[in-house]
Amino acid sequence: MGSRLIPRLVTAGHTVSTLVRAESQKKLPPGCAPIPGNALDASSYQKSVPTGSTFIQLVGVAHPSPAKAAQFRSIDLVAGREGVKAAVASGVDHFIYVSVAQPAPVMKVYQEVRAEVEALIRESRLNATILRPWYVLGPGHVWPYALVPLYWLMERFPSTREGAQRLGLVTLEQMLRALTKAAESPCTGVRVLGVPEIRSLLLPQTS
């Protein structure tokens, strides 16, 4: 997602700096400044985070599944915690975090980890936007499209409408648009974008 978001932000005229492992700097999209560091260690990069900037936290295990529970705690949780720590130390104005829809019937550890990072964000008193998608449709993710008619049907009935909307599918393009709009519209307090807001690009009030 980050590799697709960077060109969009650069094209929109934003100055973008990207945390990257030293050996991977050549893989960055053009137009952004590299910040060499380790996402699991805030001390390795926090001095390079510009004061007053927007910090977008996207680090996490690729292709989440129940089998990756240990990785969620060793990577997603640690990267989220260290990102919050770096943002506070650097005095960023706005923190953006991609969480997950909750509650949900599966992926318990993944939800727990993301909820823990959300709690850290609130405790830090950072101004923040938290996005809560459930499943992001993108390249290589074809089979979930077969569920679209089922979601449509569930949204028609009052007893299943809220769950179907909260755990609905969003496209990669919708996520990129929502991230871009959140970056361009900083908030005061904590703002949460669920699936309906991600789809519609409506930014709710903060809490």
Image (cartoon, helix red, strand yellow):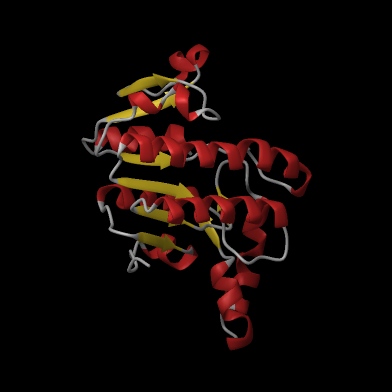
Q: Is residue 169 visible?
A: yes
Instruction: Please tell me which residue is depicted at 42% across the width and 50% down the height of the picture.
Output: 124
Instruction: Please tell me which residue is depicted at 51% across the width and 54% down the height of the picture.
Output: 118
- Number of numbered discs on residues: 0
Q: Position of residue 202 (x, y in %)?
A: 33, 65
Q: Position of residue 78 (x, y in %)?
A: 58, 37
Q: Position of residue 33 (x, y in %)?
A: 32, 21
Q: Answer above or below: position of 126 versus 81.
A: below
Relative to 31, 97 lies left or right:
right
Instruction: Please tell me which residue is depicted at 41% across the width and 65% down the height of the picture.
Output: 197
Q: Quadrant of the C terminus?
A: bottom left
Relative to 170, 64 lies left or right:
right
Relative to 30, 117 lies left or right:
right
Between 184 and 69, the residue placed more toward the observer is 69
Toward the bottom, the furthest residue is 158
Q: Is residue 107 visible?
A: no
Relative to 181, 147 lies left or right:
right
Q: Answer above or below: position of 127 versus 139.
A: below
- Quarter residue 76 falls in: top right
Instruction: Please tell me which residue is depicted at 36% across the width and 50% down the height of the picture.
Output: 126
Q: Position of residue 158 (x, y in %)?
A: 58, 87
Toward the right, the furthest residue is 67
